[in-house]
Image: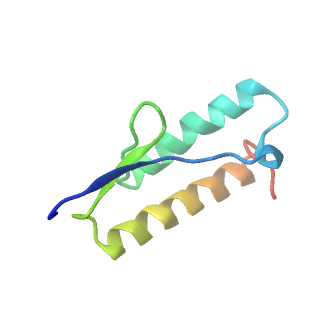
Amino acid sequence: MTQFGSFFGPILLEDAFPADVATLMMGINLIRYHLFDRGVLLRGEGGGFLSTSHTDEDINYIVQAMKDSINELQTAGFFPQI
């Protein structure tokens, strides 16, 4: 097999949920915008695709973009600091 792909997406732990659903949904939408601004495109369902075409550098970039986005949104109060 020369090519392979898989779907990925965020999983929120129970202690990471904000107090109300509206804040949670706003935070999830903002994560998508933050990632898009960093060049990472997620599908409407909140996930994306990885394939064997992606390098380790690509994957590391996606992980760091997600961490940076979550940190910024925690600082802004959309997600609790855990």
Residue at the far bottom: name it: 56
| Residue 34 in picture, x, y percent from top left | 49, 48
- Judge whether 46 appears above or below 20 on screen: below
| Residue 61 in picture, x, y percent from top left | 41, 68
- Judge whether 30 appears above or below 35 on screen: above
| Residue 59 in picture, x, y percent from top left | 39, 67
User: Which residue shows up at 46% across the image and 32% down it?
Assistant: 45
Residue 3 position by quadrant: bottom left
| Side of 15 where 73 appears, left or right | left
Q: Quadrant location of the N terminus?
A: bottom left
Residue 24 position by quadrant: top right
| Side of 33 where 52 appears, left or right | left
| Residue 71 in picture, x, y percent from top left | 66, 58
- Judge whether 17 appears above or below 58 on screen: above
User: Which residue shows up at 83% across the image and 48% down it?
Assistant: 15
Q: Quadrant location of the C terminus?
A: bottom right
Q: Nearer the viewer, residue 55 or 41?
A: 55
User: Which residue shows up at 80% across the image and 44% down it?
Assistant: 14
Q: Nearer the viewer, residue 45 or 38?
A: 45
